[in-house]
Amino acid sequence: MLYFLKKYPVSLLVIAAVVYLSFFRPPSTDLDGIPNIDKVVHVCMYFGMSGMLWLEFLRAHRRDHTPLWHAWVGALICPILFSGVVELLQAYCTTYRGGDWLDFAANSLGALLASGVAQWVRKKMQARDNRNG
C-alpha cells in the first residue's frame, strides 16, 4: 500500500474525490435546468481520474521497463469497472441516487478520452527522449 501512496499520491486523492462526489447528496442549483449537465460532470470526473492515473504512471515509470499494459489496466480498465460498481452501489445502496447506464457510458467516455490524450503525451515524451539521446 505504501508503494501506491508513494507512486500515485494525486491519483489516490482524485479517486477519493470521485467517491465522495458519487455518494454525497448534491444541492439543487440553477445548473439543474441545463440538459445533461450531469453527464458532462461524469465525463470530467473520469477524465480527471484516468488522466491522473496515466500521468502518474508515465512519471513514476519513465526510466524503468514497466510494461505499458499495466497502465492500460490501471488507468482505463479499472476506472471503467470502478464506475460500474459505483453506479450499482448508487442504484442499490442509496435512496437519493440512482444507477444510470448513461452515467456509466459518460464515465467510460471520460476514461477513453483521457487514455487517448495520454497516448499523445506518451508519444511526445518518447520523441523528446529520443532527441535528447
Image (cartoon, rainbow, N blue to C red):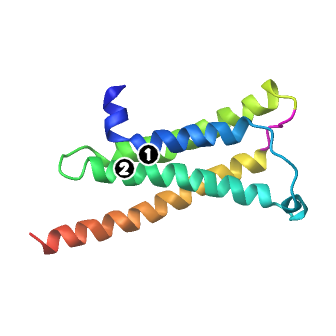
Q: Which residue is mark 1?
A: 10
Helix, strand or loop under label 1: helix
Distance of label 2 from label 1 (alpha carbons): 8 Å
Residue 30 drawn at (x, y percent): 88, 61
How many other residues sit within 10 Å of disc 2, few (<14), some (14-19) or many (≥20)? some
In the image, is residue 96 above or below residue 26?
A: above
The answer to whether 83 appears left or right of 128 in the picture is right
The answer to whether 94 appears left or right of 108 in the picture is right
Q: Which residue is mark 2?
A: 56
Mark found first going from the N terminus, 2 or 1: 1
| Amino acid type, residue under disc 1 in the picture | Val
> Could you tell me if the residues under marks 2 and 1 are in contact, i.e. CB atoms within 8 Å?
yes
Residue 35 drawn at (x, y percent): 86, 63
In the image, is residue 68 above or below residue 96?
A: below
The answer to whether 19 appears left or right of 7 in the picture is right
The image shows a total of numbered marks equal to 2
Q: What kind of secondary structure does the magenta stretch mostly adopt? A: loop
Residue 87 drawn at (x, y percent): 73, 37
**Over which residues does the magenta segment extend?**
96-100
Helix, strand or loop under label 2: helix
Of the 4 image quadrants, the one containing the C terminus is bottom left
Give residue 19's quadrant in the image: top right
| Amino acid type, residue under disc 2 in the picture | Glu
Q: Nearer the viewer, mark 2 or mark 1?
A: 1
How many other residues sit within 10 Å of disc 1, few (<14), some (14-19) or many (≥20)? some
The answer to whether residue 32 is magenta is no
Task: Write the residue at 24% across / 66% down.
Answer: 126
Task: Write the residue at 70% across / 46% down.
Answer: 104
In the image, is residue 41 above or below residue 81?
A: below
Hey, which residue is sitting farthest left in the picture? 133
Residue 107 drawn at (x, y percent): 65, 50
